[in-house]
Image: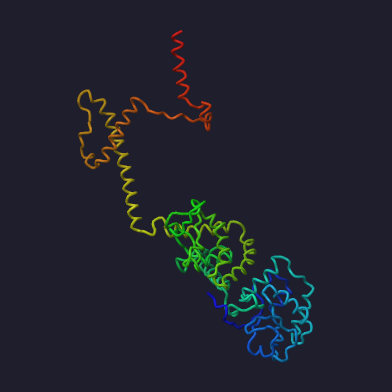
């Protein structure tokens, strides 16, 4: 859990690495070279009016050229304090329109480039406004949670790497290693609890999302009951995935998909929704996931179709195949006992079947020699019968008697034959029932002979 009352100071440019894909070239230049975010310090508080409402640690945006001047020499209108992160875009536009052209501290080259780019309109694709919000969150900006207080603050050090930056570094290292080795084989995971690997072919958003889950197994507390429980509940020990931030505290954030397709479709969407609302998931992870969602829209086009199905199939196999879930349950003693019983049952069935076949052979030869008194009875055990216990002998005897009876009398209740003509017919019509036809013919024959 993060301390929302802690005051974090920092000053960095507003630019991010993906700016050129989602905003105009002019906005990219301004964010990288002419604008920065900063936090109010104690020295700044002395120069502010008491009625301004600005507090210690509050974040504002300002002209980076005027920031080099002493505090008392900075011109009016060089800084703005957005009331929320959604207002950063508008305040940046006001600073760009009202201050930059009249600022004497901006270098000549920068001002010339700014003037040359003013004629280009902003990009309308990829939801520019939403990108401004998510990129600000990626820098570490957040609204004050107090409803009575307007403004934004820093929830992490903006100069340090974010979860998205760390994920990018891991994947770049994996790609460089694969190029040196000359193969694209996936690198092993650092821990068995990590399902995704840096060399996996997937989007950066999905990679970071799968880092927030760990393998788990279905347990009694996961049973929900009620309508639809047969489709939701699984056998004990069935593999699944769980949120690594809150699953140890409660039963929320635990998912048990029944196939790789449902893992990639329903479960992935449920995980994304859970991470957005999870109270124990760090804010920096949530902001990085929101930021990488914009990049994912471009990466999906570059990778083409089929990547999602292949990726989640790998995740499914790592859950079910690599961990051999069927041989591991919560109670190992019961599992071993059950497997031994199953093995004994299979051996018993095989022995009964073999003995039945040998009995059929003996019966076929014994009928020909019974007149001369040389028939083989069940009393002559031999070495084969000594290996079979009493249960096997009784079952073999019963099978022999049943086969002999069926050869003489035929089956007691023959089943009606189902063909294409009578498939799916109901009983009231009488069609497709050969036994009823034979019964009618047997009744009509005496009347013909009597006449």
Q: Is residue 82 shown above or below 371?
A: below
Front residue of this view, candidates 169 and 52: 52
Residue 34 falls in image quadrant: bottom right
- Relative to 266, 58 lies left or right: right
Residue located farthest toward the top when viewing the structure as drawn: 451
- Relative to 21, 215 lies left or right: left
Front residue of this view, candidates 95 and 385: 95
Identified at 63% across, 85% down, the residue is: 56
- Relative to 17, 408 lies left or right: left
Residue 435 falls in image quadrant: top left
Q: Is residue 343 shown above or below 329?
A: above
Query: Residue 18: percent from the left, percent from the top?
Result: 65, 71
Identified at 27% across, 32% down, the residue is: 362
Query: Residue 191: percent from the left, percent from the top?
Result: 45, 68
Query: Residue 321: percent from the left, percent from the top?
Result: 44, 57
Front residue of this view, candidates 222 and 107: 222
Q: Is residue 77 shown above or below 423?
A: below
Query: Residue 189: percent from the left, percent from the top?
Result: 47, 67
Front residue of this view, candidates 63 and 71: 71
- Relative to 11, 118 lies left or right: right
């Amino acid at each position: 859990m993060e301390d929302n009352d802690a005051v974090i100071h920092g000053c960095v440019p507003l630019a991010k690495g993906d700016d050129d894909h989602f905003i105009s070239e002019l906005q990219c230049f301004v964010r990288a070279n002419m604008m920065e975010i900063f936090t109010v310090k104690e020295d700044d508080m002395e120069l502010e009016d008491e009625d301004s409402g600005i507090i210690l640690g509050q974040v504002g945006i300002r002209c980076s050229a005027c920031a080099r001047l002493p505090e008392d020499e900075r011109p009016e209108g060089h800084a703005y304090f957005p009331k929320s992160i959604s207002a950063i875009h508008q305040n940046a536009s006001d600073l760009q329109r009202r201050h930059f052209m009249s600022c004497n501290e901006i270098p000549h080259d920068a001002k010339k480039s700014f003037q040359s780019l003013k004629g280009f309109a902003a990009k309308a694709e990829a939801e520019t406004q939403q990108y401004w919000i998510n990129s600000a969150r990626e820098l570490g900006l957040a609204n004050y949670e107090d409803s009575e207080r307007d403004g934004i603050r820093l929830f992490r050090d903006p100069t340090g790497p974010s979860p998205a930056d760390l994920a990018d570094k891991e994947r770049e290292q994996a790609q460089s290693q694969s190029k040196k080795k000359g193969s694209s084989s996936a690198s092993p995971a650092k821990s068995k609890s990590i399902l995704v690997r840096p060399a996996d072919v997937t989007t950066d958003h999905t990679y970071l999302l799968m880092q927030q889950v760990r393998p788990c197994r279905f347990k009694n507390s996961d049973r929900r009951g009620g309508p639809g429980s047969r489709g939701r509940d699984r056998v004990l020990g069935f593999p699944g995935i769980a949120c690594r931030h809150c699953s140890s505290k409660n039963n929320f954030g635990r998912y048990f998909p029944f196939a790789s397709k449902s893992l990639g479709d329903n479960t992935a969407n449920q995980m994304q929704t859970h991470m957005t609302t999870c109270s124990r998931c760090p804010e920096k992870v949530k902001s990085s996931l929101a930021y990488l969602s914009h990049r994912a829209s471009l990466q999906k086009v570059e990778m083409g179709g089929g990547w999602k199905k292949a990726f989640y199939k790998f995740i499914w196999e790592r859950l079910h195949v690599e961990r051999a879930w069927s041989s591991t349950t919560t109670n190992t003693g019961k599992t071993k006992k059950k497997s031994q019983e199953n093995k004994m049952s299979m051996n018993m069935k095989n022995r009964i079947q073999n003995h039945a076949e040998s009995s059929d052979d003996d019966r076929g030869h014994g009928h020909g020699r019974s007149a001369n008194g040389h028939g083989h009875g069940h009393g002559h055990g031999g070495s084969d019968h000594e290996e079979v216990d009493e249960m096997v002998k009784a079952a073999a005897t019963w099978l022999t008697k049943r086969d002999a009876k069926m050869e003489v009398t035929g089956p007691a209740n023959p089943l009606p034959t189902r063909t294409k003509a009578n498939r799916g017919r109901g009983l009231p019509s009488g069609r497709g029932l050969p036994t009823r036809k034979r019964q009618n013919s047997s009744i009509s024959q005496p009347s013909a002979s009597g006449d």
